[in-house]
Image: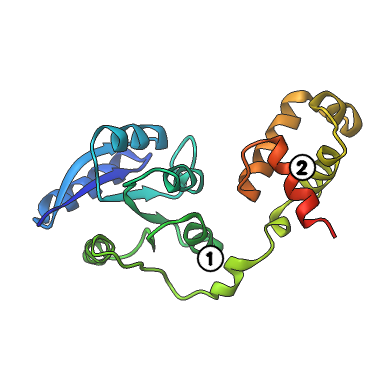
Amino acid sequence: MTRSVIIADPNTIMLQALSDLFERDRRFSLVATSKTAEGFLESCLLVPVEIGIVDWTIPQLGAERLLGILRDKPKAPRIIVYAGGGDPDVARRAMAAGAAAFLTRDVPEQQLLEVAATVAGGRMVFPYMDVRSLKQDPRESLTGREKTMLAALAKGRTNTELAAELGISINTVKFHLRNLYEKLGLRNRSQAIAFYYANHT
C-alpha cells in the first residue's frame, strides 16, 4: 500500500532532493510539491493526501499557521515538520500546533523515510521534550505590547484609538492584533475580549 505525499519547501534544491527521495521509495507516491504554504493548501484541497512534509519557515504563512488551518479541515494530511537545529523550541511549537512529527534538516535520508512511514501508520515522532510546557498559559507567549493591546481591547478601544494611545499606525495595530490572535488561538476581537475576561485575574 503506497502512501500519498505532498512536500513543501521554499528552497528549490531542497525541494528537488526531497522529491527524488520519496519518488525512489515504493512505499510512497509523491502527489505534488510546493514552494509556499498557500500552494500546499491548494494541493491538499485538490487531491486527498495522507502525509505532508513541510519546512518550518515555509512562506507566506509558515508551518505553525499552516498547521492551525489544517487542524479544522476534515481528512487533512498528517504533517511532518522539519527545521534547522538552531531553536529547540520549534519542536514543541510544532507539536502544540498539531504536527505529527518533527525532524531537523540534518537527519539521514533513511530516517526521514522511516518517520514518514511511522506517521502514515498513525503514530507521532518527536525528539525528547518536556511536554508539560505544552500546557503553559498562552498569555505567557504575548509581548508587553500585545498584553497592553489585549487589555485595551477589553475596554472597547477601536483600532484608531489603539493607534493614538500607543503612538503607532493603524497597520501596526493590525499587525500586533494578528499576532495576538494567532498566539492565543483566536479569530477576532470578540473572542479576544471574551478570552481576556475569562482569564483575567
Mark 2 highlights which residue? 193
- Which label sits in the foreground, 2 or 1? 2
In terms of image quadrants, where is residue 98? bottom left
Say if 116 sits above or below 194 in the image. below
Please name the amino acid that badge 2 sits on. Answer: Ile
Mark 1 highlights which residue? 88
In terms of image quadrants, where is residue 39? top left
In this rendering, would 9 be left or right of 185?
left
Residue 42: x %, y % from top left: 33, 31
The 10 Å Cα crowd at callout 2, few under 14, some 14 to 19, many 20 or more, is some
The 10 Å Cα crowd at callout 1, few under 14, some 14 to 19, many 20 or more, is few
In this rendering, would 85 be left or right of 74?
right
Distance Cα–Cα, label 2 vs label 1: 32 Å
The residue lying at 83 percent from left, 41 percent from top is: 154
The residue lying at 65 percent from left, 66 percent from top is: 136
The residue lying at 48 percent from left, 63 percent from top is: 91
Residue 137: x %, y % from top left: 69, 62
